[in-house]
Image: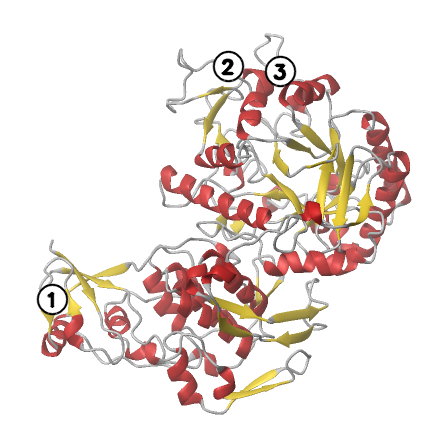
Amino acid sequence: MMWKRLSFPRKRESARHLESAKGGREISSHGLMRFLASLEMTMILIPAFAGMTGLLSLLYLSPAFAAGSDNGNVGTTVMNSHGEDMELEFKLYDPGTESIVDYARYGTFLGAGTDKYQYKVTNRKALAAAVGEGVYPNNSVYKDPAYRILVTKGKLAGSHWDYVNIDNQQLAFYKWATANDTPAVQQFYTALALEKLGEYAQAIKAYHAVVVHFPKQVGWTYWHTPLYMARIAIDRIDFITRKHPGLGIKLAEADVEVENGHNEKITDDKFVVNPGRLIKVSPEELKVKRTDVSKLKITKIVGAGSVKLVQFENGHWQMRVDGKPYLIKGIAYAPTPIGLSPNEGGYDPNNAWMTMDLNKNGKIDGPFDAWVDKNKNNRQDSDEPAVGDFKLLKEMGVNTLRLYHHAANKELLRTLYKEYGIRVIMGDMLGMYAAGSGAEWYQGTDYTNPRHLENMRNSVRQMVEEYKDEPYVLMWMLGNESNYGVVGDPDPKSNNAGLGSNAKAQPLEHYQFVNEAAGMIKSIDPSRPVGFSNGEVVTIDLLSRHSGHIDVFGANVYRGAQGFGRSFWQDVRDFMDKPVIFTEYGCPAYMTGKDQETAEAKQLEYHKGNWEDIVYNTAGSGFGNALGGVVFEFVDEWWKSGLPPKFSAKEHETLGDFIAAFPDGTMHEEWLGVASQGDGSQSPFMRQLRKSYGYYRKVWNEK
């Protein structure tokens, strides 16, 4: 086959600038018409522009908006009538007349900064010309020659939702730019495609259009929780302008507050909108500048022992251990042997690894007998000695392990601390997964049940009294994304095990008890901070009213490769005024239809974006409320996808668990490790280290 690259001209440019990448020949306007004819082009019926509908449709919006990365201006291969494969290179047909749109010239802002906000367009034609292709209210995409060819050749068939996570973002752009959907959703995904194509300036305009025109419209996640499209559009603009300071573009004063916006209803939402404005600034102004907080006045100290939280006069937070700044470089560690799970073999993934010695050599398996399969041949060669996970964790730069529910071996944890310099966040599930409450699994922890509450008090008290004098305990952590707690269906055919908790149905009672338990911990051990692990910022407004004894807001967050977004950091600051630890973040190293090399590269990209966002928001920069984070997790666990008999802990499941913000748009929970267990034949000893492990080994060891 002959391969050619075809580049269409921008609007108002001469068609003579079309050229073949290989042949280098120019195509005249007559030549263009012949080429279009060779594609057997027919009349295209153009539907009304989706943005004109103005309807709020309640759809399930995949949060995979955060997946993917800069793919550059990729093209699409089409075949002409001569049997030649022609590649249509992406190039904006109509980039607009203004790189930064002055909306005041084309309409009127009413009630900015209030719940009465609206923008009334007074000169639609001029505004369309200013913003350009893919940005409301412009519909020049229908005149784009590449779009017309792709429609004719059937390249844009099917639902626009099928185009969210595809590699070819040229197709995604054209599909979403012409989609009929909620205008805010349609405009957001059009902007996302532009961003992935490397058209950053146009993407910024497209994201800002969401804020200006549709700030009160909502999309929906797979879990049927609302996505406030204008807020995440601002997040994306913030990310692009910070990542690409050379653009010299800044979004000033923009803010969308949603009162009552942290529950699952939208009927009680109240939007306070300031669309802000894009302004031109010098690239130097956009470069990250860090304040030396050691020179600032400390206004608050939490903790009476060696571990303290300090707040500075600028509102930023920092953890200090023995008087020195301590950034949590944490990881979840549960080296579960292949074939075992809570449902198969009664295995306890939280604590069983602390005593397990399957090879009967007198050493605990994972911590001391693990070895690295350097050549990934799934067998231990002579140059692959046992080194142990503790050594691998130290070399990775880990300084903290998160233990979810108590521990089972004090001497092991003392060794972890004394010989490897790693501390632990000691946790109690506080009824999540029915842990500590004494509830039957399908009954679930009931936060109004006096017996369950007393059992949990005793569990927390036992933990603190047993470990409060251990030097390796950094802090205490209650729960684990506990606000998500639901009961399941005992019918095995349902594959709905639930989470052994009623917390989601009892949010007030749950948070009140969390605060009570935190207060009890502080009465027993006032020397250490106490945190609570929430799921995302869901119901953070309610939590904030019942968190007087909680020192640290913990959150399990999986938002995508760009990090957590300005809206997350802002919510934590505004509602909690407490520092935040990411009690889980991570990404699977599996992608449907992709090889392992690609999947690992995407996992690395995700981790890099998340860690950089955490560092940016530590004391002295950004919102300044980050204390660090806990990577989930060190090594893959093969039991996570579901219950037997449908799923087996002996199989590394590749079926996607649910729609989420990961590289292929799906969670693969059995692939979250920065190390794998290979083909499972040498479990629980073999480790195949992934690219993300190497990334942390580099950045976590930098001085």
Vertical placement of residue 288 versus 686, above or below:
below
Label 1 and label 2: CA atoms lie apart by 62 Å
Q: Callout 2, which amino acid?
A: Ala
| Residue 486, horizontal then vertical, whole percent | 71, 49
Going from N to C along the chain, the mark reached first, 3 or 2, is: 3
Identify the disc placed on residue 386.
2
Q: Compared to 272, does 443 lie above or below?
A: above
Task: Kindly identify the residue that appears in the image at 59 percent across and 31 percent down.
Answer: 398
Q: Quadrant of residue 633?
A: top right
Please indicate whether residue 336 sits to the left or right of residue 163 in the image. Answer: right
Which circle, 3 or 1, is nearer the viewer?
A: 3
Name the quarter where the C terminus is drawn: top right
Q: Residue at x 25, y 81 (%)?
A: 12
Query: For numbered disc 2, what is the local secondary structure?
Result: loop
Which mark is first along the chain, 1 or 3? 1
Residue 658 placed where, x, y %? Answer: 53, 50
Specify how the rendered protein is coloured.
secondary structure
Q: Which residue is mark 1?
A: 81
Q: Amino acid at mark 1?
A: Ser
Mark 3 to mark 1: distance in Å? 67 Å
Residue hosting label 3: 364
Query: In screen coordinates, is 159 left or right of 699?
Result: left
Residue 338 is at least partly visible in this image:
no
Question: Callout 2: few (<14), some (14-19), or many (20+) C-alpha neighbours within 10 Å?
Answer: some
Instruction: Examine the rendered structure and indicate whether residue 311 appears above or below residue 161.
Output: above
Closer to the camera in the image, 419 or 285: 285
Spatial CA distance of label 3 from label 2 is: 12 Å
- In the image, 357 versus 27, the foreground residue is 27
> Mark 1 Cα within 10 Å, few/some/many (few <14, many 20+)?
few
Q: Looking at the image, do the residues carrying marks 1 and 2 touch, with CB atoms under 8 Å apart? A: no
